[in-house]
Image (cartoon, rainbow, N blue to C red):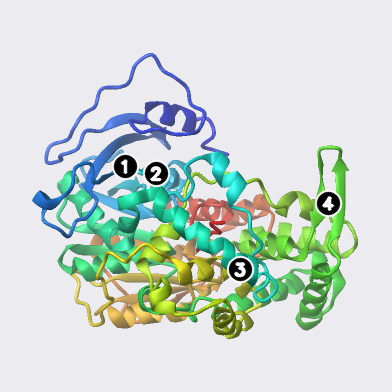
Amino acid sequence: MFYSSIVPLIRSHLPFHHNHDSVTLPCQPPAHSYPGERIAWTRCGHLANRTLECANLTVPMDHFIATNNLPDNKSFTIPLIRLRSPNTTQATRNLLLNPGGPGASGTEFVYRRGAQLAAIVGDGFHLVGFDPRGVNQSTPQATCYPTTEARRELSSVRDRQLVEDSGELWAWTANFVRACADTMGGHGGYVNTPQTAADMNSILDALGQAGMYYWGFSYGTLLGQTYATMFPRRAERVVLDGVANQFDWYGALLDAEMLTDTDRVFGGFVEECVRAGEEGCALAELAASKEELWRKVVVGLGRLRDDPVSVYVNSTVYGVLDYWTVWNNGVFPALYKPADWRDLASNLAALLRGNATAAFLDYQEKAWESDGDALAFIALNDGTSGPAKWSVDRRALVDLLQPYVNQSMFAETELDYYFPKAAWVIPRTHSYIPKRNVSTAHPLLLLSTTYDPVCPLVSARSASDAFEGSRIVEVKGYGHCSPAVPSLCVARHVRDYLYEGKLPDSHVQCEPDGKPYFSKPDDVRAVVETLALGDEDRRILLAQQELARDSWPMAWRRRYM
């Protein structure tokens, strides 16, 4: 990957600890500050001919109590990274970024895809990534396990089928939520989105910037909506990309809206496969119509429920491939990224013909390597969680979840979210309630694909109704967040909004550029080169293509068990 040679160098300069391998240099660059800022930056590398700077910021554990009542050592340390624009005359503002999750790292996001985002945004902004409280290298890190060894030993539980696995999952969850509370102590209840929104003001204040310029993806749209509601006068430019419903997130037991279009995206995968034909999609040889191919894939994979496949590669690589591994680790994640559809189709075609090796190697359950549980803390501290809200035993919870599970072929992926949500023992410490008719310093820009597997277009409409003057720009296609479907039209709207505050008069639909479905990476670039584009548009579209292919951290509700 393009960043593989620079990341070790960057991390060796970081003023905060990383678990990754790094290069030890003889000395650290001196910290420095800029006029108007109250933060000391350390240069920590270069990316795309731009300087990277790193820093730490200490924020109070609870922003909403008087400072003189704050207990000793009750704070969080937030790592920051800034990709500086080379045009320091034009770039007088900082654009804060959040990649999603919840629990995804903003510092890693800038390392990984700052160059592409900078190409889309242009030279008028410095890009700032941060690890939200509890996430990645922020301290204390939100975790339910005191050691990596404890995680490996204690985190395994069957959570694939609602009825069959409910007994084990219910019993395991009772211990899991207690471990989360005990491990984090007093900090645990303050790993939530309203506190992170207040942390963003601390970042702005340290940067000497009055107005918030922000681009949030997936869960980052919840953070953006929360910020714009709590601090509307500072919300100068807020871009929400792949919009989630904050009213369901904070106030509902079940997020019934999230999976609205998930099965439609799977249908898009099947339909575009048939359209691409055998040359573009290996599955196309199995059927002549969308309906026939849908049936063959669903029925064929469904057989793995009762008859998993034994796969032997060699004496150290072998195992069993079952339905849930293919469905949850292969098919469902690919719905986020149409750039993965070609490889998914190849693996599924081979599997349905009797060769499971490729699918096993790509989708097998990996040993748990996560460093934390920020997803659990953020989601469950934010929402309507705990026995007092749910008032259910195991059987009642199963009955409550059954209609939810039946609404989508992919709903079972959420079981490991709702069992802990019903049992969560950390008290809710925030009083945030989403509002409607919010008037911000400048109206919001909302971005969405037509069919998003986890943040449907209807959720963008809900957000648009809540924020006065906001507008939706929709890119016609499938996938999670606008980068899933490259479109210069979307990029132009983003630039017009960030630089000049321009919004369309009404909901706008943008066409995709290039070939977003079942194309080889080399073919995608070749198509871009054939388009009649200026140099700047070509750079933007190529950057969008790279974002579309990358497994960047915008996943929604990753598994935390």
Q: Earlier in the sequence, mark 4 or mark 2?
A: 2
Q: Determine whether label 4 and label 2 are within 8 Å by CB.
A: no
Corner quadrant of residue 168: bottom right
Q: Nearer the viewer, residue 200 or 272?
A: 200
Amino acid residing under circle 1: Leu
Indicate whether 389 appears above or below 350.
Answer: below
What residue is pinned by disc 2? 107
What residue is pinned by disc 3? 413
In the picture, the disc for residue 357 is 4
Furthest residue toward right:
354
Q: CA distance from mark 1 to mark 2?
A: 6 Å
Corner quadrant of residue 401: bottom right
Q: Earlier in the sequence, mark 1 or mark 2?
A: 1
Q: Earlier in the sequence, mark 3 or mark 4?
A: 4
Q: Determine whether label 3 and label 4 are within 8 Å by CB.
A: no
Instruction: Give the foreground label among 3 and 2.
Output: 3
Indicate whether 193 appears above or below 472.
Answer: above
Amino acid residing under circle 2: Thr
Indicate whether 115 appears above or below 392.
Answer: above
Q: CA distance from mark 3 to mark 2?
A: 28 Å
Q: Earlier in the sequence, mark 1 or mark 3?
A: 1
Amino acid residing under circle 3: Thr
